[in-house]
């Protein structure tokens, strides 16, 4: 092989590797937020909702990610389970699961909520989708017995199925009137910013799991 031909082959191979690396690098992670009004952005401008603020914050930190808002106001864990397959389709790489608050508000038996949350996580993990389970706490007016059955659901299900766990989605926001709408239950835009800041390390760990496959 002549030097000229050899250089041509080497240059072609280098260009191939560069293009292949560029294509891999350009792959955007799709992260679906499957939740209720707390993550959907109830009464907020589209840019203030949790998925939008999270995507913006992640991109500012250098992550190539699209965050899909699959939140439905008023949804229960049963509703989330019924729409799981089309809310988190085959192109989904990771899911933040934020459901169960409405179960507690309606006094749905914790066993039912556990079964639904577990089934969603199980099915996603079977598809090799990485999951971050965002925990919720039962209102204390439902009594200690209800709280004892409800509160541990998220950590236990996450541990059983190799998912990540964030203890309380509304950490730092719940019961703070400055960070909630007038109803005292749903975060305002500033409250969502606090949620994004608090949950960020867990989300970055989620993305790292996807990237390391």
Image (cartoon, rainbow, N blue to C red):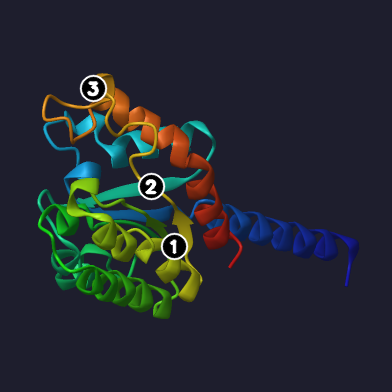
Query: Which residue is drawn at the image coordinates 10% and 57% (left, top)?
Result: 106
- Image quarter hosting the C terminus: bottom right
Comparing 81 with 20, the one in front is 81
- Residues under numbered marks 2 and 1 in contact, where contact means CB atoms less than 8 Å apart: no
Which residue matches tag 2?
Answer: 168
Q: Residue drawn at (53%, 34%), measured in percent from left and top?
A: 61
Which labelled disc corresponds to residue 112? none
Mark 2 burial class by Cα count in 10 Å: few <14, some 14-19, many 20+: some
Residue 66 location in percent, x, y?
A: 37, 47
Q: Which quadrant: the N terminus?
A: bottom right
Rounded to the nearest whole Å, what is the CA distance between mark 3 and mark 1?
Answer: 28 Å
Q: Which residue is mark 1?
A: 155
Q: Identify the element where label 3 is drawn.
A: helix
In the displayed structure image, the side of residue 108 where residue 143 appears, left or right: right
Q: Which residue is mark 3?
A: 177
Relative to 128, say whether 106 is above or below.
above
Q: Circle 1: is it few (<14), some (14-19), or many (20+) Cα within 10 Å?
A: some
* Residue 206, percent from left and from top: 50, 55
Viewer-closest of 133 and 138? 138
């Amino acid at each position: 092989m002549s030097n000229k031909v050899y250089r041509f082959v080497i240059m072609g191979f280098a260009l191939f590797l560069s293009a292949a690396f560029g294509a891999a690098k350009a792959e955007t992670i799709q992260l679906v937020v499957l939740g209720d009004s707390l993550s959907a952005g109830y009464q907020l401008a589209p840019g203030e909702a949790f998925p939008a603020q999270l995507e913006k914050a992640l991109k500012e930190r250098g992550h190539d990610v699209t965050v899909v808002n699959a939140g439905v106001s008023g949804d229960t864990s049963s509703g989330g389970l019924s729409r799981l397959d089309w809310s988190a389709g085959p192109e989904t790489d990771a899911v933040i699961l934020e459901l169960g608050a409405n179960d507690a508000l309606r006094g749905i038996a914790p066993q039912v909520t556990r079964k639904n949350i577990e089934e969603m996580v199980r099915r996603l993990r079977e598809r090799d989708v990485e999951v971050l389970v965002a925990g919720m706490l039962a209102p204390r007016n439902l009594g200690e017995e209800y709280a004892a059955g409800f509160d541990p659901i998220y950590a236990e299900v996450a541990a059983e199925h190799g998912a990540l766990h964030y203890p309380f989605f509304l950490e730092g926001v719940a019961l703070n009137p400055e960070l909630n709408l007038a109803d005292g239950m749903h975060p305002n835009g500033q409250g969502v910013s606090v949620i994004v800041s608090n949950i960020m390390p867990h989300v970055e760990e989620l993305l790292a799991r996807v990237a390391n496959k």
